[in-house]
Image (tube, rainbow, N blue to C red):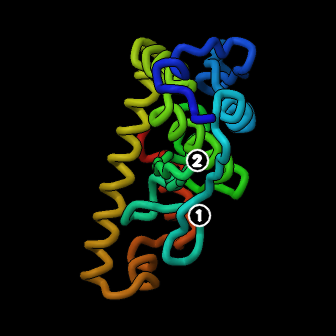
Amino acid sequence: MALKPFKELFDLDLSKEVAKRPVKKNSNMTLDYLEWANCIKLLHEHGAETVRYGMVKNENNYPCFYNLNGESPFVSVWVEIDGERYEEDYPVVNGIYVVSNPNQLEINKAKQRGFVKAVAINTGLGLGLWIKEEQIINEDKDIQKEMDQQDTSKSLNDQITKLFAQALQIVGDKETLYSVLQSSKEEVSKLYRSNDHAQ
């Protein structure tokens, strides 16, 4: 028995299969989402014989990737359904918030969400939930404002990183640079992570 066609899976009523999660911290607004285990169950119920998924690992055999500045963590997930393989990159986030220094639990959650998204994009199963989520996020002015603030903060973090790298080239080593700044590595890292400079 083959997996049902895209449109048929897209049109499935998932109202009894979904869970709810808040859009953002301390928010009463929730989004419907399909948990990874229910996603696997539904694939099998609708024709899939074998479903496997896992993560691509970086050069250090670690399941999380970062940009050149060591920011913007994401996972790269592969999904195989009856021999058809799909891949999806998914950011490590908590709601709409980027997790800058993710732990194993947060990386695993990103893996599961990446799996569900890869299934949705390639089979139609649950894709309507992602479309609805995009609409809610794009139409909510408070959410957009918070996301803009995150972008501003990220831009400032990028500027700090660039300036630090330029100063490091001039001074020669980090210890001397910290001394010139009259600061320590820990204090600079704390400022960078706290976004105090964005105030």
Separation of disc 2 and disc 1 at Cα? 24 Å
The one of 101 and 149 positioned closer to us in this rendering: 101
Q: In the figure, residue 167 lies in which quadrant?
A: bottom left
The amino acid type, in three-letter code, at marker 1 is Pro
Image quarter in which the C terminus is found: top left
Disc 1 residue crowd, few under 14, some 14–19, many 20+, Cα 10 Å:
some
Q: Which mark is residue 63?
A: 1
Q: Residue furthest front?
A: 1
Give the percent coordinates (x, y) of residue 197: 42, 47
Q: Residue at x 46, y 19 (%)?
A: 7
Give the percent coordinates (x, y) of residue 120: 52, 32
Q: Residue at x 51, y 40 (%)?
A: 118
Residue receiving disc 2: 82
Q: Which mark is residue 127?
A: none
Local SS, label 2: loop
Up/down of 115 relative to 55, above or below:
above
Image quarter in which the N terminus is found: top right
The one of 75 and 118 positioned closer to us in this rendering: 118
Up/down of 187 relative to 3, above or below:
below
Among the two numbered marks 2 and 1 on one chain, the one whose residue lies closer to the N terminus: 1
Give the percent coordinates (x, y) of residue 46: 65, 28
The amino acid type, in three-letter code, at marker 2 is Asp
